[in-house]
Amino acid sequence: MLLSPSHHDHFTFTFALKACTFLTSSLIQKGREVHACALKSGHHSDLFVQNALLAFYSATFDADACRTVFSETSSPDVVSWTSLVSAFAKNGFPAEALLAFASMDVDPNEMTLVSALSACSRLKDGNLGKILHGICVRRFGGHGRNVILDNALLDVCLNCGAFTDAVQLFNLMPHRDVVSGTTMICGYVHHGKYEEAIAMFVELVSDGEIVPNELTVACVLGACASAGILRLGKCVHSYSLRNGIDVDGIVGNALIHMYSKCGAIGVALWIFGGLLYRDLVSWCTIIRGMATNGKPKHALQLFAFMLCCGVRPDNIAFLAVMTACCHAGLIEEGLMFFRAMHEVYGILPEKEHYTCIIDTYGRASCLKEAEDFFVGMPLMPDKCVWGALLSACKIHGAGEVVYDRIQKRVLHAGMTLGGGTYALLSNMLATAEKWDESNNARKELGAKRISKLAGYSWTELA
């Protein structure tokens, strides 16, 4: 087309741009060349070509180009607006997407609302979700007409904390697809309802209502991992193999996580070794699995192997290897990785990394070093950081060492800790025979209306 001397009309440009929406680098470049050709020929001012350009740049995640094309559109229609809202929503600009939606001077269609709902879900704004839901009801008469729109509403309910509404909506949907089922299963997992997630998966598969995809299986494996139900995790693994579901990618990573969490670290390592493609998530999962299953030195070896394979670690990878150092009592190695994060890889340590180093010092009875490291933190400590320090002090009977600092920086500063941290503080002070202070820490729970959740754990016996 670009080399042909023949005349091209707006249909030619429209279909050429549609062909370029397949996300390969060569086709994306061709799409830009088609855009340039449209500019030279003057067809760029045609509404059909402009909408095709908007759809192309939206599909290729180029929000800036989409904004530029839209600004040159003299009379945007609903297709133009939908492409703009979609481009902002896809590219991580949910506020701009909703602003564009609010600026529309034409009635939205169902796909416009889907993009707006996606942006609302990212913002976790329940009030906006209700407004958009009301628009859906007024414009399209409620649920059931468009499964894509219903799925978007379902996602908004789950991300905005309206879990009961999500369950009700799911049960009322006359037509459900794999996206509906996967969204609901992931919602159960996100809200800690692991057994319900597994039960829904079994029900949907048994009824033949949906054919699970890789994301569905990964969500269910996450539920099995969090619930510690190895037997059901094996069943889901077998189901994946029998039904030809690709066990590389997210399913492979989910299997490594599930077997690691359930204590079957040998199987997790076997699956890791069989992956055709190992991404950073694969490495992080197996390294953390080794660290938490009593094999910290194996975790360190895997981290070194990962670097040799040319995989660049991120903050999660460093947390995994630092956890291994913590469990192995390797203080110097843990500090080396902590420093390498910023000095070598330019990654700023987060509170989880500081917590891990403090825990490493505490396990090695280096309370003075733990306290000094705590005091030197550039971040405001949260309940996890305090918990690591207090646990070390309580275990090693050093309550008086840090009490004055805690009193000044926490109780008098008005910081709110979790219920478990206040209880730990109270127990630590009681161990140091500071009975009045221990009682005051307990009173903070009631004064700030903080409840301490009862801890529990379980394991499945073969």
Image: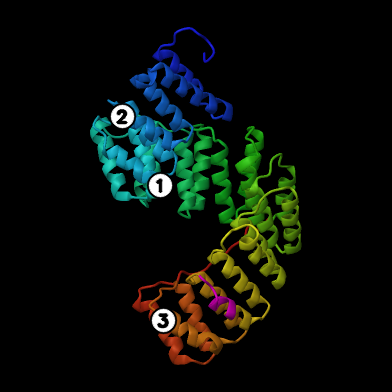
Q: Earlier in the sequence, mark 3 or mark 1?
A: 1
Q: Residue at x 45, y 47 (%)?
A: 187
The residue nearer to you, when weighing 121 against 368, is 368
On screen, 268 above or below 33? Answer: below
Q: Whole-percent x and y of residue 259?
A: 66, 52
What residue is shown with label 2? 109
Q: Secondary structure at mark 1?
A: helix
The residue nearer to you, when weighing 390 against 190, is 390
Q: Whole-percent x and y of residue 99?
A: 30, 42
On screen, 339 above or below 403? Answer: above
Which quadrant: the C terminus?
bottom right
Q: Whole-percent x and y of residue 61?
A: 47, 36
Q: Earlier in the sequence, mark 2 or mark 3?
A: 2
On screen, 140 above or below 46? Answer: below
Q: Is residue 271 magenta?
A: no
Q: Residue at x 37, y 35 (%)?
A: 67
The residue nearer to you, when weighing 459 against 451, is 451
Q: Residue furthest front?
A: 40
Q: CA distance from mark 3 to mark 1?
A: 35 Å
Q: Earlier in the sequence, mark 1 or mark 2?
A: 2
In the picture, the disc for residue 411 is: 3
Q: Secondary structure at mark 3?
A: helix
Q: CA distance from mark 1 to mark 2?
A: 21 Å
In the picture, the disc for residue 122 is: 1
Residues rendered magenta in the picture: 372-378
360 left or right of 122 in image: right
